[in-house]
Amino acid sequence: MLLLLLQVQNVKFQQVSVHERRPSSSGRHTPGCNLAAIVSRLISGAYTTTRTHNNGAEIMFWQRHLSRLSNSVKVLLNSRPELLFKAGEDMVPFVKVSEKSLKWDLVIRALVNDSMGKALPFVLKERKCGEEMSITTLVSGNLESLREIEDVNEERLKAVFDVYLHFGGYVPRVFGIQGNGARLAVVGRGRDIANAKYSDWVRLRKDLEKLRPPSTTELLLSNNGDHILEGCLTNFFVVCGKDECGEIYEQNDFDYERSVEVQTAPVSEGVLPGVIRQVIIEICLRNGIPFREVAPSWSQHNMWREAFITNSLRIVEHVETILVPSSWKSMESKTSTEIRWEEKQFEVTPGRVTSIIQKEVMEKAGFEAYAVALYKD
């Protein structure tokens, strides 16, 4: 059972029972929805999702998530305000805000922290001791409130936005276990406004589900069928050999790690700046792991040694298989059975570089942890 809590300005709460989308015993996905999907049914806005760790005592990378959330609000306001305010054709009120030089980060943090302080005591009473939680925070604009404001400043702007919080019980998958790897398929084009995380994307990506092959756990995006950008819910990385012969030095960790490079598509090509994605970039640069921001090319998949996906719930998940359509034109098909697929298989357990990165991410998560108890006082 997941607990959905919505906090609006008058601090009302609503509780519903839902089920997270999980593969059935046959490998097919059973009906259900994830946290973002639930939120998107209710209202449009910018959102971010993270989870707790250390038996629910700490929120992972919370300060980074608040920064990304405020950035998403700014991006939507300046490029597609209707995705933030659920507005019609009347765009005049947005000029009041978009032309102002406002401290967005302070506004969003103040709103979210106030909401968390009111919601968490209630949530913690309902939670089982030691249970981890997923936390989705959505910020949505109130157009009527915006119209009533004559002179916009940071304090008055707080009345324009509503904060919605969703808490759910979460059981992290054990990293490195055979069978816990991701099974991916490239099925569609990259998304618009990828540098913002917004709830309408949940609705837009539903059209891709008709092309999901059986047993696939995540769908990848590409604009040409060769350069892979990201997943619908994740960022995508490969560990690629740096020479054409693709020789791997199995006996020497140092040689192997220096003979490969980690690759992921740059944000400039239409990729969400994921929180864990940025953490991994920092880890690679700090530890001397060869890294390059370039979209992994399927035409070079014979040189891919490892692959993994990331988001703030899965953290790091190794990839077992990737399916890519033999012809990009076949993406016009109505179902996955009409498509001929090419397949790349990896080891069923994480590779060496993937394991190193996962360990470093978890250590960094502990270092940057935000104590849940800070919202109880």
Image: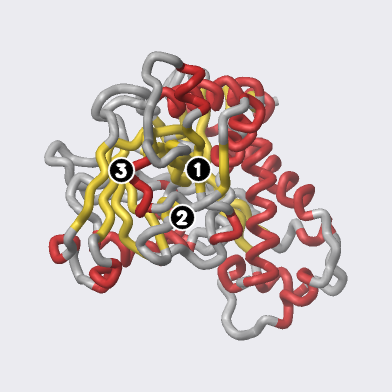
- Horizontally, is 298 left or right of 5 in the view? left
Q: Which residue is mark 1?
A: 263
- Horizontally, is 362 left or right of 90 in the view? left
**Is tag 3's residue or tag 2's residue first in the polypeptide sequence?**
3
Q: Residue 281 placed where, x, y %?
A: 60, 37
- C-alpha separation, residue under disc 2 versus residue under disc 1: 11 Å
Q: Residue at x 35, y 23 (%)?
A: 176
Name which residue type carries label 1. Answer: Gln
Q: Which residue is mark 2?
A: 229
Q: Residue 340 placed where, x, y %?
A: 17, 60
Q: Which residue is mark 3?
A: 19
Judge the density around disc 1: few (<14), some (14-19), many (≥20) Cα neighbours within 10 Å.
Answer: many
| Up-down relation of residue 137 to residue 45 (above or below) | above
- C-alpha separation, residue under disc 3 versus residue under disc 1: 34 Å
Identify the disc placed on residue 255: none
Q: Quadrant of residue 86?
A: bottom right
Name which residue type carries label 2. Answer: Leu
- Horizontally, is 255 left or right of 245 in the view? right
Say which of 61 and 220 sits in front. Answer: 220
**Is tag 2's residue or tag 1's residue first in the polypeptide sequence?**
2
Considering the numbered disc 2 on the image, is that residue within a helix, a strand or a loop?
Answer: strand
**Is tag 3's residue or tag 1's residue first in the polypeptide sequence?**
3
Of circles 2 and 1, the one toward us is 1
